[in-house]
Image: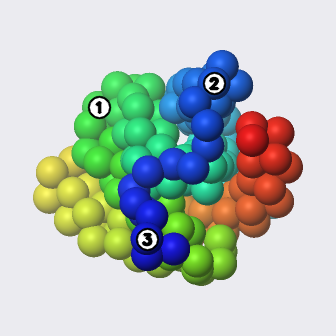
Amino acid sequence: MFGTNILSWELPWNRKTVGVILMLVFVPNILSMVNLTTPGGVKIHTFQVAIFLAASLLGPLGGFLSGMIGSLFSALTLSNPYLMIGNGILGFFAGWFLRCGIRPLFAVWMAFCLQLLWLIPADYFLAGLSAAFIQNLVLMLFLSDTLWAVVAARLSGPLKRWLA
């Protein structure tokens, strides 16, 4: 593992790979319009599944691009460009930890912790969100990230074989 570039992706460049890259970069914008509400009132975001798939298939750079570009719609809608950086951090470090051999759920949880180092101060000081709102957001994002990390882990193996 240490002999390869951890930032590169291992997939061959072909039409399928380019199509998947484009899909994983732009699909989060569509998925950001969909939130699942649980009976307890917790809203689960859906866009993270594409970020985690990009991180798994394409490594840190793919996760970063999916997080950044995939958050464009939300950033514009919510007038909060800072969330693009936070989702870029999430995707980059999820891909980084996955490339280091860390199991998918733990890789996503560690990436989420690093994302929080940006998200909390940016949302509080730059976006002007209340501490109570950020507290609920952190819980919602943790639950969403956990769910979509498991889903992405299940989907990434078959997708890798299909792309190879």
Circle 2: is it few (<14), some (14-19), or many (20+) Cα within 10 Å?
Answer: few
- The amino acid type, in three-letter code, at marker 1 is Ser
Which residue, given by chain and number where applicable, does mark 1 sit on?
79
Say the numbered circle drawn on residue 3: 3
Q: Earlier in the sequence, mark 1 or mark 2?
A: 2
Query: Does dot 1 land on a helix, a strand or a loop?
Result: loop
- Looking at the rendered structure, the kind of residue marked 2 is Asn
Residue drawn at x 57%, y 50% is: 10
Which amino acid lies under the numbered mark 3 shown in the image of this protein?
Answer: Gly
User: Could you say where residue 24 lies in the image, as x and y percent from the top left?
Assistant: 59, 34
Cα–Cα span, label 3 and label 1: 42 Å
Cα distance in 3D space between marks 1 and 2: 36 Å
Residue 101: which quarter of the image?
bottom right
The location of residue 102, given as percent across then percent down, is: 58, 79
Per the rendering, the mark at residue 121 is none
Mark 1 or 2, closer to the camera: 2
Q: Considering depth in this image, is 58 or 42 the residue closer to the camera? A: 58
Element at label 3: loop
Q: Is residue 42 above or below residue 146?
A: above
Question: Could you tell me which quadrant the C terminus lies in?
Answer: top right
Residue lying at the far left of the rendered structure: 125
Q: What crowding class fits label 1: few (fewer than 14 Cα within 10 Å), some (14-19), or many (20 or more)?
A: few
Q: In which quarter of the image is residue 163?
A: top right
Residue with the mark numbered 2:
14
